[in-house]
Image: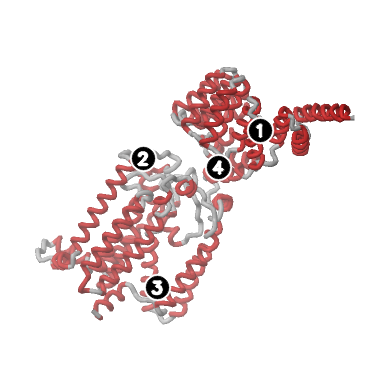
Amino acid sequence: MAELDADLDHILPSSVLPPFWAKLVVGFVSLVCFARSYDGDFVFDDSEAIVNNKVAGVVGRADLLGALFFLLSFLGYCKAFRESNKEGTHSTFWVLLSILLGAVAMLCKEQGITVLGLNAIFDILVIGKLNVLEMVQKVLHKDKSLENIRMLRNGGLLFRMTLLALGGAGVLYVRWKIMGTGPPAFTEVDNPASFADSVLVRAINYNYYYSLHAWLLLCPWWLCFDWSMGCIPLIKSAGDWRVTAPAALWLGLIGLICRALCSADRHRRRILTLSLGFLIIPFLPASNLFFRVGFVVAERVLYLPSAGYCMLLTFGFGALSKHTKKKKWIAAVILGILFINVLRCVIRSGEWRNEEQLFRSALSVCPLNAKVHYNVGKNLADRGNQTAAIRYYREAVRLNPKYVHAMNNLGNILKERNELQEAEELLSLAVQIQPDFAAAWMNLGIVQNSLKRFEAAEQSYRTAIKHRRKYPDCYYNLGRLYADLNRHVDALNAWRNATVLKPEHSLAWNNMIILLDNTGNLAQAEAVGREALELIPNDHSLMFSLANVLGKSQKYKESEALFLKAIKAHPNAASYHGNLAVLYHRWGHLDLAKKHYEISLQLDPTASGTKENYGLLRRKLEQMQKKDV
């Protein structure tokens, strides 16, 4: 047993510090690295993946489970290795657990299958002690003894590998059933190299992307939330100085692989092979070798390879310290590297606190990335700074003249600023570039409606619905168009479609109630209002609209209760107080009417209808006072 422990420690050296203090130091440094963003917002893709995801209970935990897999798998293997009498049972248990956790991770992340691959690497090289070079030599020389195979079979490794293979196949099948057979649809801006006509250009650029990922491991200083849309221009000729980067990468990798296979030191071969396996295999799904991926550079695909990089770095410094007497200098360099990387983590963690900091941090890294300017503009627009948002949207369109989402958002802002002609031009160009862009068609319809081009607006709305069948907002806007054209039945049908697709669509419900109220269909308006409040019981605008209908139907008590409830939910709405005052005026509760007229005029002194009604009430009160005298 002692010999086995020493052998394992030779591969994975134990800490210089006692175990408790080692854990404490690692935990403290981890907290320092990421403490700035522990209470940060969900930003960028997190919003879709977690906040707006109906199955976030699974999706939001995938990364956590993937990390938990590594911890449990590593601890389990070490324990199983040391308890030699129970090795097979323990290792098999951790294999099964890794399949489960890897399956959950795979449901939403491209790294899911690689956790199973890394499990296999660790099992083969550390638990099974497979000598890769010796194995290859025996196969090449057709040596039938193959002692390694017998040893692996006796140790249960082949059984565990079979479990992993079957588990991986099962996970792939489940993902295939969930996501369908077709691959995701990516565009040229997502991964320009994969759309290049020349095989040579594709190969050179893929290798350049690999070198960029390697550089981010070595020097993670230039970090960006998105590297697409012109951030990294294509290499199109051999004269581009950037071709030296792939050459340097492959020279380094080939050197490491040769050392891993040909070193005379058995322990060195095993740790180098293990490190390279951890470094390379998790990156393969992101390499464009098996299928097109939707990114140029993605920092998330380096999470798992960073384990192999750290092992190589540790091994390299350990080997260097054996060949020099200046061990203090080596220690200083190591501490310096750790300090710089901790500092970078602290800075980057702060940048991920909210979208404004994250997007602005990318401007200096990828100034040619149209998506960066688009996201900065969108963030500014969401915070109400339309003038600055327009500037960034225009820059996004300049950098990528086919960026339809930037055109759509810019057109929306121009529409709100009543710059309708330019808004129409932008939205028309967007749907010309991408004819199935439903949102742009709808927004184009809104602009055309504002320009009184009703036939064109109706056609745009219909086209939007054609490309997105379940589009409640488009049905709502189509209903508004029909209402403007006095096509009341068509308007009601459109709004009803909106509420069928989205039962909580308050605006559609409100417009139905108001239209039925204005056309004298009080019974229908009341029925629609009650139906709406059953679905959205706390919507004060629906309470207000139904209260108006009930007041006209002389159902004063019920109307009063709804008005008061709406005012409690939204006390500063002048119209709520004004219409409640009208109800009291009709009902004969003149003092209460006077009170709410005055509150309404305090909130909105310019409301002419309220002024007129208040004047009528005052004259009536004066006449009543004269009669009493």
Query: Disc 4 designates what residue?
Result: 374
Residue at mark 2 to residue at mark 4: CA–CA distance: 30 Å
Q: Of discs 1 and 2, which sits in the foreground?
A: 1
> Residue under circle 3?
317
Q: Nearer the viewer, mark 3 or mark 2?
A: 3
Task: Determine which quarter of the picture holds residue 11.
Answer: bottom left
In this rendering, which labeled residue sits more in front, label 2 or label 4? 4
The type of residue carrying mark 4 is Tyr
The CA distance from mark 3 to mark 1 is: 62 Å
Q: What's the distance in space between the residues labelled 1 and 4, CA to CA? A: 19 Å
Quarter of the image that includes the N terminus: bottom left
Dot 1 or dot 2, earlier in sequence: 2
Q: Amino acid at mark 2?
A: Ser
Residue plotted at (88% across, 28% down):
626
Q: Residue at x 54, y 58 (%)?
A: 39
Q: Is residue 418 above or below residue 99?
A: above
In this rendering, position of residue 499 left or right of residue 262: right
| 33 vs 576, nearest the viewer | 576
Give the mark toward the camera: 3 or 4: 4
Any part of residue 148 in sight: yes
Q: Earlier in the sequence, mark 1 or mark 4?
A: 4
Residue on which the image places disc 1? 417
Give the amino acid type for the residue marked by disc 3 in the picture.
Phe
Disc marking residue 198:
2
